[in-house]
Image (cartoon, rainbow, N blue to C red):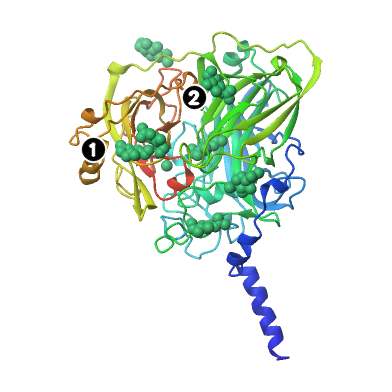
Amino acid sequence: MKEMFPILLFHLIFLALFGQLNASWAEDKLLNPSKLEMFVDELPDMPRIHGYGIVDGSPKPKLLTIGMFSKKWKFHRDLPATTVFAYGASRRTATVPGPTIEALQGVDTYVKWQNHLPSKHILPWDPTIPTAIPATKKGVPTVVHLHGGLHEPASDGNSNSWFTARFEEKGPTWSRRIYHYNNNQQPGNLWYHDHAMGLTRVNLLAGLIGAYIIRHPDVEGPLKLPYGDEFDRPLVVFDRSFRVDGSLYMNSTGNNPSIHPQWQPEYFGDAIIVNGKAWPKMVVRRRKYRFRIINASNARFFRFFFSNGLEFIHVAADSAYLGKPVVSNETLVAPSEIVDVVVDFSKSKTDEAILENDAAYPYPSGDPVNESNGKVMKFIIKKEREVDTWRVPKRLIKYPSPDLSSVSQTRYIAMYEYAIDDEPTHLYLNGKPYEAPATETPKAGTSEIWNVINLTEDNHPLHIHLGLFKVLDQTELEDDKEEFKDCMLKKNDAIKCQISKYARGKKIEVAAHERGWKNVYKMTNGSVTQILVKFSYIHSNTSYSFDPTGEPGYVYHCHILDHEDNAMMRPLKVIK
Ligand SMILES: *[C@@H]1O[C@H](CO)[C@@H](O)[C@H](O)[C@H]1NC(C)=O
Ligand SMILES: *[C@@H]1O[C@H](CO)[C@@H](O)[C@H](O)[C@H]1NC(C)=O
Ligand SMILES: *[C@@H]1O[C@H](CO)[C@@H](O)[C@H](O)[C@H]1NC(C)=O
Ligand SMILES: *[C@@H]1O[C@H](CO)[C@@H](O)[C@H](O)[C@H]1NC(C)=O
Ligand SMILES: *[C@@H]1O[C@H](CO)[C@@H](O)[C@H](O)[C@H]1NC(C)=O
Ligand SMILES: *[C@@H]1O[C@H](CO)[C@@H](O)[C@H](O)[C@H]1NC(C)=O
Ligand SMILES: CC(=O)N[C@H]1CO[C@H](CO)[C@@H](O)[C@@H]1O
Ligand SMILES: [Cu+2]
């Protein structure tokens, strides 16, 4: 026994270190989120990095180096520090979310994205879904996608262009160490995040997200919207669950474990995090602020509203300004959608306003929110009245409406979910895996109509790389849609299945603030959503300032990350 003891101890340490003990240990050590007092941490403003230099008074292209680091991050005053993956100019300055990159329209930003991550992931991932797996089984594959960016395919962060630390291993379509963002598009809100094959959900959960803003001072300055670091603030919102020791918790038992031991169709966390703090607070002055709210949750939809009735004045959506401001008392944000709103705190009748959320999860038919996930953050409004120099003009920036007569193609995109005993195993677009050759091959410079048919139970936010789109119409399928669904499952051909016969139900109104140009939209279940996708700039008639036809092409996918990973994503190949 005496000799055995060290061996036993060694085994225990080994097991504890390498995870086999975690499964039983993990679940009873889950943190009850109501143990964290709300509104105690100040809302951070993430570091701002300029994606341009100033030489002799004029802006010049710039090369940034941004790394991905494993480090500790405090999500709440009373929660032990959490190991995260964070973007930053250095390990010391890396944050969750990462730094906000501020670019100028027409000035190129180059980024050397560097992977400094350890050899093992901090979250459970599932090798049985289509996944980037390094041959040595060492290193965390990553690749950065700038969401909403119009740039060459080789800098688009294709899921198979992943790389591990020191570029030791690279995915099959990897070609560049330095990414080139032209920034030649309209001013607006973008965000960057990881996009590695089969790892997007866990890499984002670990912290690999950040905001990116393209500004055009000549066009935006005259609007006099709230501006500058104090009044123009990105809010990156997501949900996370923790163990009592502060570590991130993700359920590691699949919903169909005999097929996918770990994968689950949707991740929901119990704590709502804004700019890296759980339920933070922010002291504001009695005047207007602009908030660019990015939903960086894996699967949670948010419907935001203020406890004291303050309104949202929408000035832009996820990729472009609106023609006119739109006022609303609540706003629904799907994963990866961005709302860009002005809030006028001088209108507040109280000295505090809580930003709340009442979206069921999964949206729209899942569990109702409760005290924890129904609260987002608190604004403490100073008492003193002051003169507000910011305004919201009656007209913002109007881009020409899509020219329907020039549409060159009409496509049907059907969303399918496959299940065993009602538990989803995987999801496909058009019934095809990601690896099947591209079927969506738009011509550069043209516009197309896509009819997106949801044949699943859920509301899927569809995101298209490169192409910006406008939602034209959303129509419910008629009651006998099961016939249509059966036909689609057999033939996968919307025309042969007589879509026009079924797509005659109720029209679903598209909210006024979502009628602008977008890059993500909620594809409501049981309906056909018609969008016009433009494969050219929306703000000018010049052709793209890069070649969109190169390898490895682009993709389009569902932005519920757990769906995207398994494998609700298809190639998009632009041709000449
Ligand atoms: C984790 O997921 C499994 C299978 O989906 C489920 O049975 C289990 O209750 C979950 N655990 C927790 C703590 O939610
Ligand atoms: C917002 O206004 C609509 C219509 O007036 C109303 O039905 C809804 O309950 C309001 N929402 C909130 C959060 O006050
Ligand atoms: C963020 O987007 C995901 C996926 O579209 C969605 O499920 C989630 O509800 C959204 N969250 C917010 C805060 O908008
Ligand atoms: C809210 O629901 C979550 C998930 O079911 C749970 O973990 C949390 O404890 C609940 N919070 C409260 C205050 O009931
Ligand atoms: C969408 O799903 C919800 C909840 O399952 C359901 O109430 C609603 O009728 C569905 N909508 C359509 C158009 O099928
Ligand atoms: C492009 O040209 C067409 C036809 O001349 C014009 O109607 C449209 O407004 C132009 N678009 C932009 C963005 O300038
Ligand atoms: C076309 C179609 O059948 N769509 C599905 C969309 O989602 C709903 C669930 O709310 C299903 O009932 C529909 O079958
Ligand atoms: Cu989806």
Q: Is residue 206 above or below residue 458?
A: below
| Mark 2 lies on residue | 185
| Mark 1 lies on residue | 484
Can residue 270 be seen at all in this image of the molecule? no
Looking at the picture, how far across and down is residue 429, in whole percent?
34, 42
Q: Secondary structure at mark 2?
A: loop
- Three-letter code for the amino acid on which mark 2 is drawn: Gln
Q: Indicate which disc, 1 or 2, sits on the residue closer to the N terminus.
A: 2
Lateral position of residue 40 relative to residue 323, left or right: right
Q: Is residue 3 above or below residue 559?
A: below
Looking at the picture, how far across and down is residue 398, in whole percent?
48, 13
Q: Quadrant of residue 520?
A: top left
Report, in whole angstroms, how far the alpha carbon at label 1 lies from the one at label 2: 40 Å
Front: mark 1 or 2: 1
Lateral position of residue 507 relative to residue 246, left or right: left
- Three-letter code for the amino acid on which mark 1 is drawn: Phe
**At x 67% / y 41%, what residue is drawn?**
276
Residue occupying the far right of the picture: 384
Using the image as rendered, state which of residue 442 and residue 532 is in the foreground.
532
**At x 59% / y 66%, what residue is drawn?**
24
